Image (cartoon, rainbow, N blue to C red):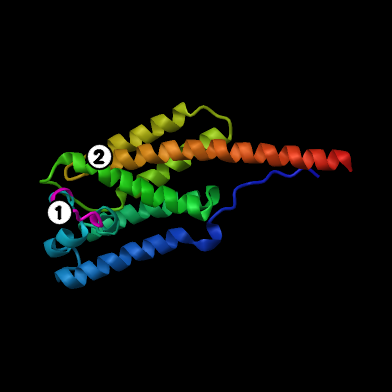
Amino acid sequence: MMIFLLPKSSQNHKITYILIALNITFYIYGAIVGGNAFVTGKNVIDVLGQNNALVLAHGFYHQLFTSMFIHASIVHLGSNLIFLLIFGLRAEEMFSLPEYLGIYFLGGLAGNLLSLAYGPGYISVGASGAIFAIFGACVIYDRKSTQRSIITALAFALLLLVINIGENVNILAHAGGLAFGLIIGYLLALKHKTTNQKQYALNYSYTYST
């Protein structure tokens, strides 16, 4: 029997729902501390959001991670979680748990690091960079792993990036996360293809010899 070895998905871990729950928990905490259920208070954002001045001048590097779970308002939270649910569940089918978490957190970090280019006067919050990384990884992985042209995936990714440009939108975080997701998704498609080919050859050799 010839068997292809597919990457073990992260579906059993329900990681997307866990990430959604974490984002909601952080928002509730911010609402309680800030005293407003609809808008996150400045006192919360200054501590857990990404304040470039504090990161650059005072080494508050933890903000590069905590800011992924802080949202400016309940509308901001809701819109991000809708996209996380859509793309996250798809990513669970494609990637293993370590791969999924790596894409999410490293993609979010890539976006936040790029956001430092705005300078010390900029403050940002949200999971958008991480979500764009998940999206980018999914679209490029789907095209590459099925031997289809990646041009369509790149065009779709660019379109989503462009339509999200707007006032108070951290486009650098989006672009950084998306670029990371596209690169790592492409590399994972190549890695899984090589693994599958090796397993196919091994099983074929075993079947033929017996």
Residue 159 point in image, percent of width and height: 34, 33
> In the picture, residue 46 is in which quadrant?
bottom left
Mark 1 vs mark 2, foreground winner is: 1
Q: Which residues are magenta?
A: 56-63
Q: Which mark is residue 116?
A: none
- Helix, strand or loop at label 1? It is helix
> Which residue matches tag 1?
58
Q: Is residue 22 left or right of residue 12?
A: left
Furthest residue toward right: 210
Q: Residue at x 26, y 65 (%)?
A: 27
Looking at this view, is 179 or 146 the one in front? 179
Residue 128 point in image, percent of width and height: 31, 48
Q: Which mark is residue 172?
A: 2
Decide if residue 39 is in sight here: no
> In the picture, residue 171 is in which quadrant?
top left
Decide if residue 176 is in sight here: yes
Instruction: Looking at the image, tell me whether mark 1 or mark 2 is earlier in sequence order.
Output: 1
- Alpha-carbon neighbours of circle 1 within 10 Å: few (<14), some, or many (≥20)? few
